[in-house]
Amino acid sequence: MDSEDRQKKILMMKIGVGAIIVLIFLLWVFNMKNLWRPIMINNNNGQTQDLTKFKSDINNQMTEINQRLNDVANQKQEAANKAGNDLLNKVINGTANSTSSPINASTTPISSSTPGQIKVKDSKCPAYIDCMPTIGASKPCRIPAGCEGITQIAY
């Protein structure tokens, strides 16, 4: 009795799986008829299919996006130019309005008690010392004595 019951269950399983396979195949074939129809169909009224309308909408959107991106790029460039011109005008106005005389290197060194100004003790001090790493022997990166406030280390 167990073998007959088992055989019936296997037969029912095969029939059920077969029916599901046939159902899926029929649904697939039914859906395929929509894929084979022509894409460009002109109606009697001269209206084109939705695909061409979609394509023209996408083209219009892409044109609008490119135009907006160009506008943003132009605005950034104009802002950078304006900032550069403002800085240049400030520098020009600052140098034109300054009344200080140029420092001559042959004159006596200047010493000032103001903490914001540079104290020149020795006119032989370099403006900077190059401490960039190199291949081979390393360079000494020490500021000479007396040039502490004048010489800077460049890395």
Image (cartoon, helix red, strand yellow):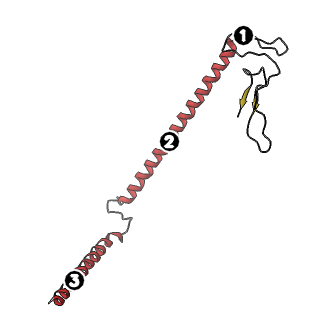
Please name the residue that numbered disc 2 is placed on.
Answer: 69
**N-term mark: 1 or 3:** 3
Instruction: Please identify the quarter of the rendering in which residue 127 is found.
Output: top right
* Residue hosting label 1: 112
Q: Nearer the viewer, residue 97 or 146?
A: 146
Compute the Cα span from label 3 to label 2.
62 Å
Q: Are marks 3 and 2 in contact (CB under 8 Å)?
A: no
Q: Which mark is residue 28?
A: none
Which quadrant would residue 101 be assigned to in this image? top right
Residue drawn 79% across and 44% down? 136
- Residue hosting label 3: 15
Q: Residues within 10 Å of mark 2 (few under 14, many from 20)?
A: few
- From the viewer's side, name the closer residue of 47 and 57: 57
Instruction: Please identify the quadrant where the C terminus is shown.
Output: top right
The residue depicted at 37 percent of the width and 68 percent of the height is 38
| Separation of marks 1 and 2 at Cα, in angstroms | 54 Å
Q: Is 56 displayed left or right of 119 in the figure?
A: left
Comparing labels 3 and 2, the label whose residue is closer to the camera: 3
Question: The residue under label 3 is which amino acid type?
Answer: Ile
In the picture, residue 91 is in which quadrant? top right
